[in-house]
Amino acid sequence: MTDINLTLQDGKKIYFASDFHLGVPTHEASLLREKRIVSWLNSIEHDAQAVFLVGDMFDFWFEYRHVVPKGFVRLLGTLARMSDNGIQIHLFHGNHDLWQFGYFEKELNCSVHSKPVSLCVNQTLFHLAHGDGIGPGQRWFKFVLSVYRNRFFQRLFAFFHPYVGISIANWVSYRSKLKTFDSNKQYLGDDKEYLMLYTQELLKNKDFSYCIYGHRHLAFEKKIHNTTVLNLGDWFGSNTYAVYDGSRLTLHSIKA
């Protein structure tokens, strides 16, 4: 687990968001969502010390040696400007955009995390993870993730021409999303939600004030003893994000 230490400056805040899934369901819908995200980023730039985007920024992302997926220039340009202006940008691998091999570090001067992160802000401890493949069960999903993360299969996929590879990946991703998005909107209960079960096990070994996740496409805030468990939701309808101002973490929503 990566450890990040951050001293929050007076008047500054830390922002968290997840699951933009830019690229679906259509270019037109994705573009509107991207403009909404960029507008939000512009609105927080004046007091943001750090921005954590906790996975699945893109519905599909694969970095070939000399090629990256086209589009998303508004978001990437905005993040580059924010980074140039001294704001820390942290990007997490999601299960849809985990094939990142150095492009964002080089072009955006940001930090990219492929595993859960322990974040300490003025002695307040956070646990951050996208949320895919953690917790009990999910055997088929964990198997698929292991294939996606395998270097051999990543290199094998890279042999596809980008036009072919990206087209196949977008088709598979879209079909998968049609089946899962509705079910992901329902809270299953504290005893069945794998993120809650994962957090219960996590807290046996270390105390965290906040545990922040994405992946579930459902914004919720729960308590386990003195720990706040917060899922960030998505930007398809709820347009939710979280803010830490040095004293408390709050969940917010932007009207579409």
Image: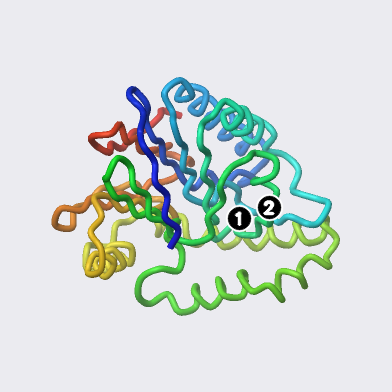
Label 2's element?
A: loop
Q: In the current view of this chain or complex, which residue is farthest to the left?
A: 225
Q: Which residue is mark 2?
A: 102
Q: Categorize mark 2 by other alpha carbons within 10 Å: few (<14), some (14-19), many (20+).
A: few
- The picture places residue 100, in percent across and down from the top left corner, at 65, 55
Label 1's element?
A: loop
Is 89 on the left-hand or right-hand side of 14?
right
Q: Which mark is residue 42?
A: none
* Front position in the image: 144 or 77: 77
Residue drawn at (45%, 68%), measured in percent from left and top? 133
Is 221 on the left-hand or right-hand side of 145?
left
Residue drawn at (33%, 56%), measured in percent from left and top? 186
Q: Which mark is residue 97?
A: 1
- The picture places residue 148, in percent across and down from the top left corner, at 62, 70
The amino acid at mark 1 is Asp
1 or 2: tag closer to the N-terminus: 1
Residue drawn at (76%, 49%), measured in percent from left and top? 68
